[in-house]
Image (spheres, helix red, strand yellow):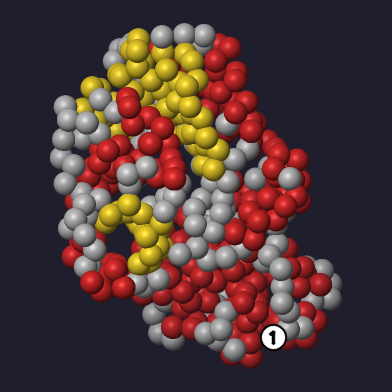
Amino acid sequence: MKYAGKGNSERILAAASRGILDWNTKSITLDDCIETIRREDPEIARAAASVLFEYFRHKELLDHLVMSSVSRGTIRMEVKAVALSALAQALFQTAIAGESAVNVAVEHLKHTRQRAAAGFLNAVLRNALRTVGKGPFPPDFPDLLKDRWNRSYGSEKTGEMIQACSENPPMAYRLRSGELSADLAEVSVPLALAFTGDFMFFECSAPEVLFRSEAFLNGRIYIQDPATAMSVTLCKPFLRGQVLDACAAPGGKTVLMYDSAMDHTDFTAADRSAFRIEAMLENFKRLAMPSVKAIEMDAVKPHVPRESFDLIFIDAPCSNTGVARRRPDVPWRFHRQRLAEVVALQKKILDGLAPLVRSGGALLYSTCSIEPEEDILQVEQFLKRHPEFQETASRVLLPEVHHDGAFATLLVRH
């Protein structure tokens, strides 16, 4: 639904405000919010997403500014979401002046069911901007995750990771085949990263050039972070025979394995969502991967005979703490109960899929988390329960300016 009758500035504010409201009230992710905006008003989706990214990177500051500017300490969530979006624009975006951001927010509220609060919003925003000053404003990051990272990785590395997560990451892509055109090569920088093996990754400073390029349109370019290649390089010697990507959707790791596999390798991509499988098959068709089979399957209770596969690739559901560069809401969604729940789910998936690996085959377990409970400790417990497996390779990538964080381990069955 395009915000009819509104100028671009108000449409951007309206979309960003709705994203903040939905994130706070519907327990959905930032990715979900942005996907909704893309469906309903694609023309302004990128600009609205930028506002949302700035909000989550400065969440503590912006929440405090709004609430400290409310004299009675209460504000309707619909109005608060507009205030937060306007402040994110005023303080952290150069495309709109602070005064203009306030005016757009006030006018927007007049067009909604909250129009009676327009004067109140005007006072809140102007008071907040007077209070905060000109900055600079360091990135916000929740203490719970910061303390965990300090204990696991030290304060210096934690500071580097938080800084990396506070900056807009460049668009990263992989060249699947052929060469870059001259115009795309001009706006692309190759990434020389040891963990990507033979894969060719680039950073692009002009996404509009990439999206109109012949290489992208015919499937020779795939948008993905270099960290995704680390797990595939670990299991490359086992990319033969029957290969199952057990938690495949949206299919990025399947594409990596397909592009790296030996001849006569049969791929099956599985997911428990029929909708996601349909979208994944469309993607495989676009990328000229017609031989990849897709099945609907619950990885906890797979309906597949024992010892059916030479390699099972498990990109497990996780807390996503390694990808906070591209999903800045992740640190604010992290809490101990959710961590315990996802660790329990990972255990069930590992135990459910282990019997499907043939003798001499392998299981590749990966996450986009850097939390020990989901990674090293999870594997240690798995090996105690399944002594028929042996860990032969393992790696943790911490998020940096050129790539996300990730974990992967290769477990070979005797």
Question: How many residues crowd mark 1 within 10 Å: few (<14), some (14–19), many (20+)?
Answer: some
Camera-side residue: 156 or 284? 156
The amino acid on which the numbered mark 1 sits, given as a three-letter code, is: Asn
**Residue 103 visible, this orientation:** no
List the single residue furthest toward the right. 72
| Image quadrant in which the N terminus is located | bottom left
Would you identify the image quadrant in which residue 185 lies?
bottom left
Name the residue beneath numbered marker 1: 122
Which residue is rendered at x = 25% and y = 74% of the image?
183
Q: Is residue 181 above or below residue 7?
A: above
Q: Is residue 158 above or below residue 151?
A: below
Camera-side residue: 34 or 21? 34
Q: Residue 328 in the image: x percent, y percent?
A: 58, 57
Q: Is residue 386 above or below residue 117?
A: above
In the image, is 124 to the left or to the right of 39? right
Would you identify the image quadrant in which residue 51 lies?
bottom right
Would you identify the image quadrant in which residue 140 lies?
bottom right
